């Protein structure tokens, strides 16, 4: 076996469980992936994957062994890449950053513009993705995450806490009357929620526990769209304070944040890359800029927006 591309295909199918998803991950079309897999199985005279209903691929014993070998090779290649990149002292080149949709929409882009002015030789590639991308596999060089990193090979720092609160359009709250407490808000006012299949999202899980399904008048898997729906007067939206307080079209339905939903904002990189000049510059300028907005992230921004009288 001397074709790394063949091993990459095996590993991608093993990870995704789908030939279609593997082809998309590798940037090839489905027919090419199918042809390569079939040729490889013919060459080795062994079946690597069982084809199951709904397009699912399950590895055989031989396929699992090949995928494990490919993963070891990939890890070595990434370690070498990180080692070389970690010794790079130039303030130039590409820097791949991943962030959530809400942070990119509301706060991050302004800091990226300032970074561009200061470091014009560094090209930032922003991957907006609510998933936790792998820094070990170089899916990103730097991640802005709403959770504390647990992997031992990562390095970073906490920038701020993240508070959440209920927001609505001023006209909507004036028409319905502002609630006096959280219980009244969830009992009397329409609420914008997440799609019912949302999993692993604290805000979605909290709403599912706290709000009767009949009180949810609109569902979407996008926090930015929840903000837009609240501005349009559809109901209350539970939003991070840096998103809701930073938008002039919304006001808090209640003064205080939801106590059960306090989170954190971290900037993280792989330990092998922390000495890289462009990574250090990003931590200092963008990470430092976000940390200076701690009051906004933690829900302590002075409330200068009022609910108009009905």
Image (cartoon, rainbow, N blue to C red):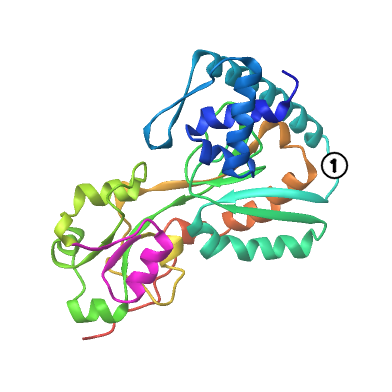
Quarter of the figure with residue 181: bottom left
How many numbered discs, if any? Answer: 1
Was residue 259 drawn as part of the magenta stretch in this picture? no
Determine the secondary structure under disc 1. Answer: loop
Does residue 136 appear anywhere in the picture? no
Q: Residue at x 64, y 26 (%)?
A: 39
Q: Quadrant of the N terminus?
A: top right
Q: Quadrant of residue 231?
A: bottom left
Look at 71% across and 31% down and name the residue there: 272
The residue closer to the viewer here, 291 or 13, is 13
Judging depth in this view, the residue of 109 and 60 nearest the camera is 60
**Residue 29 falls left or right of residue 253:** right
Picture coordinates of residue 73, whole percent (x, y):
69, 21
Percent across and percent down for residue 120 are 80, 61
Rendered position, 105 above or below 280 = below
Q: Is residue 208 above or below residue 81?
A: below
217 within the magenta span: yes
Viewed as shown, does residue 223 lie left or right of 209? right
| Residue that label 1 marks | 89
Classify the position of the C terminus by image quarter: bottom left
Q: Residue furthest right?
A: 90
Residue farthest toward the bottom in the current orientation of the protein: 310
For the record, the magenta segment spans: 216-238
Q: Is residue 141 visible?
A: yes
Q: Position of residue 32 (x, y in %)?
A: 63, 39
- Give percent across and percent down for residue 279: 73, 45
On screen, residue 229 above or below 193 = below
- The local crowd at label 1, few if under 14, some if 14 to 19, many if 20 or more residues have their Cα within 10 Å, is few
């Amino acid at each position: 076996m001397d074709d790394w591309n063949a091993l990459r295909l095996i590993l991608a199918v093993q990870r995704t469980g789908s030939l279609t998803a593997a082809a998309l991950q590798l940037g090839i079309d489905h027919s090419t992936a199918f042809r390569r897999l079939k040729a490889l199985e013919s060459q080795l005279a062994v079946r690597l994957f069982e084809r199951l209903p709904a397009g699912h691929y399950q590895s055989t014993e031989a396929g699992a062994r090949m995928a494990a070998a490919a993963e070891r090779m990939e890890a070595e290649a990434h370690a070498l890449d990180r080692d070389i990149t970690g010794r790079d002292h130039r303030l130039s080149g590409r820097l791949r950053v991943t962030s959530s949709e809400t942070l990119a929409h509301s706060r991050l882009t302004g800091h990226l513009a300032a970074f561009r002015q200061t470091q014009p030789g560094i090209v930032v590639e922003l991957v907006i993705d609510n998933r936790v991308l792998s820094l070990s596999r170089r899916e990103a060089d730097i991640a802005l995450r709403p959770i504390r990193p647990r992997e031992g090979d990562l390095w970073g720092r906490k920038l701020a806490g993240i508070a959440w609160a209920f927001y609505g359009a001023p006209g909507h709250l004036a028409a319905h009357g502002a609630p006096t407490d959280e219980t009244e808000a969830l009992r009397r006012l329409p609420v914008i929620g997440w799609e019912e299949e949302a999993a692993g999202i604290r805000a979605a899980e909290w709403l599912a526990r706290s709000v009767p399904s009949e009180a949810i008048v609109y569902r979407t898997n996008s926090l930015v769209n929840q903000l837009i729906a609240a501005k349009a007067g559809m109901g209350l939206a539970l939003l991070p304070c840096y998103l809701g307080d930073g938008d002039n079209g919304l006001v808090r339905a209640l003064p205080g944040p939801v106590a059960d939903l306090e989170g954190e904002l971290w900037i993280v990189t792989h330990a092998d890359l922390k000495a890289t000049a462009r990574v250090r510059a990003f931590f200092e300028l963008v990470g430092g800029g976000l940390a200076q907005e701690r009051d906004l992230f933690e829900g302590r921004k002075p409330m200068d927006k009022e609910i108009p009288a009905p």
